[in-house]
């Protein structure tokens, strides 16, 4: 048996719950530290980077899900760890005002737990989807789960933003605790009984081997290895603009704080539309194949970045449409890449879906942290010698080149069956 549409939506609730907690850590607490506590911005930046760095453990979580107590166990264990880390992070906020060192230690512990929780829950969830979803539904499953995650992020950010006014540390802790443990409860209800009803383990599954040996076997697979490098390159390009787009809008286009925040919202709206487009056209109508959508997303992202760069030189008031276009093609690329990931996870050695998803998840997490810091560092360096518009524009063009390189790499990393053209039949075989 494979996952029904209802079961896929239920698993999407877990992704939504995960996003709801994480957005509080990367957005709300970030603002509180910088504005209310008047701490240097590098502090929350370091903590967010730490939670990404901890996710290098994703291959280990995927391996444990493959060989241990089942994926449901690790999904719930990860969500519990994530919820605990979020509550500790919120509790550390008032401690900073009393004793900075103690608050920092608590925050480091909290964000380490957050990274471990995201890695364990997210990797195991994707492994369950990859191994138990029928091939023709995998692209749609990727679209559904990621759209639900974006929805969870948007609703949580908007709702908690309203509830936090007026701000107090106690109010913050109560809201974070309610969201975190509510998300954990929702996740438990969502996954209950699903794994037991689907065939996620095969009769030819190998006996459990030591983690490093299992990881080495997956890394020895040419497709898995090349796809890992593709994920790192593409996601580095994807996240390079994360820390520089809003400053670009403020410094070059004179956007206010509210306007730049709305610009970020417009970009996320574009991501949502891009993901929805791939889901409807590729799965609903059978148009195109995963590799085609990945390549189109990379090409469109590169062109949008080139337009954003050019607008800084011309001063035309078209930044918002260009940013929406960037989000649209980013979303198109992301959901097609996730669909490719789910397809490839079932290829190669038996019963190693979790290990492969973990390997690719680690590459994505490292690229997220590296890409954001790389973009910011390059802008700081360029601004020493160039006007703001030229400095930012040069970095955006470099990011566009990375997307073009990822598009070229996709041609040799993601391929398709020659006799079947529907998106669900993509196999990810090397030429």
Image (cartoon, grey):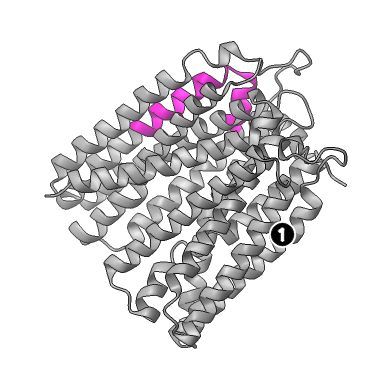
Q: Nearer the viewer, residue 286 or 50?
A: 286
- Circle 1: is it few (<14), some (14-19), or many (20+) Cα within 10 Å? many
Magenta stretch prevailing secondary structure: helix
Number of marks in the rendered image: 1
> Where residue 224 appears, x then y in whole percent?
75, 41
> Where residue 318 appears, x then y in whole percent?
45, 75
Residue at image location 73% in from the left, 37% down from the top: 344
Q: Is residue 331 above or below residue 251?
A: above
Is residue 361 shown left or right of residue 104? right
Q: Quadrant of the N terminus?
A: top right
Q: Is residue 338 above or below residue 184?
A: below
> Where residue 372 appears, x then y in whole percent?
49, 61
Say which element carries label 1: helix
Residue at image location 64% in from the left, 53% down from the top: 232
Within the image, what quadrant is residue 64 found in? top right
Find out whether residue 407 is within the magenta segment: no
Residue at image location 51% in from the left, 68% down from the top: 375
Find out whether residue 74 is within the magenta segment: yes
> Where residue 134 appears, x then y in whole percent?
68, 26
Pointer 1 residue: 407
Within the image, what quadrant is residue 315 found in? bottom left
Q: Write down the region rendered in magenta.
A: 60-83
Question: Is any atom of residue 203 visible in this view?
Answer: yes
Question: Is any atom of residue 244 visible in this view?
Answer: no
Q: Is residue 160 above or below residue 205?
A: below
Q: Nearer the viewer, residue 283 or 232?
A: 283
């Amino acid at each position: 048996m494979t996952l029904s549409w209802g079961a896929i939506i239920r698993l999407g609730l877990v992704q939504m719950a995960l996003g709801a907690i994480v957005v509080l850590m990367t957005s709300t607490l970030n603002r509180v530290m910088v504005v209310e506590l008047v701490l240097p911005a590098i502090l929350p930046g370091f903590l967010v980077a730490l939670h990404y760095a901890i996710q290098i453990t994703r291959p280990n979580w995927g391996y444990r899900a493959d060989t241990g107590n089942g994926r449901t166990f690790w999904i719930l264990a990860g969500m519990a760890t994530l919820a605990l880390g979020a509550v500790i992070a919120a509790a550390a906020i008032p401690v900073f005002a009393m004793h900075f060192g103690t608050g920092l230690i608590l925050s480091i512990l909290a964000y380490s737990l957050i990274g471990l929780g995201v890695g364990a829950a997210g990797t195991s969830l994707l492994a369950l989807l990859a191994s138990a979803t029928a091939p023709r539904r995998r692209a749609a499953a990727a679209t559904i789960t990621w759209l639900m995650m974006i929805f969870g992020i948007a609703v949580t950010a908007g709702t908690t933003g309203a509830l936090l006014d007026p701000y107090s540390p106690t109010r913050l802790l109560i809201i974070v605790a309610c969201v975190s443990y509510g998300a954990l409860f929702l996740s438990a209800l969502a996954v209950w009984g699903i794994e037991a009803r689907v065939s996620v383990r095969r009769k030819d599954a190998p006996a459990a081997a030591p983690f490093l040996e299992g990881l080495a076997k997956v890394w020895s697979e040419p497709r898995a290895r090349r796809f890992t490098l593709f994920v790192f390159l593409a996601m580095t390009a994807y996240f390079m603009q994360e820390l520089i787009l809003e400053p670009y809008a403020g410094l070059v286009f004179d956007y206010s704080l509210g306007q730049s925040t709305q610009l970020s919202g417009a970009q996320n709206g574009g991501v949502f539309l891009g993901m929805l487009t791939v889901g409807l056209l590729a799965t609903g109508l059978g148009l195109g194949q995963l590799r085609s959508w990945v390549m189109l997303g990379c090409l469109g992202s590169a062109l949008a970045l080139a337009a954003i760069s050019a607008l800084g030189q011309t001063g035309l008031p078209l930044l918002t449409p260009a940013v929406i276009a960037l989000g649209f093609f980013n979303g198109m690329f992301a959901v097609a890449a996730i669909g490719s990931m789910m397809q490839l996870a079932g290829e190669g050695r038996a019963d190693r879906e979790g290990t492969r998803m973990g390997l690719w998840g680690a590459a994505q997490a490292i690229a997220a942290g590296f890409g954001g810091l790389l973009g910011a560092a390059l802008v700081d360096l360029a601004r020493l010698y160039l006007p703001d518009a030229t400095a930012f524009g040069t970095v955006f063009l470099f990011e566009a080149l990375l997307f073009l390189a990822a598009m070229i790499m996709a041609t040799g990393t993601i391929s398709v069956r020659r006799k079947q053209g529907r998106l669900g039949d993509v196999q990810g075989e090397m030429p």
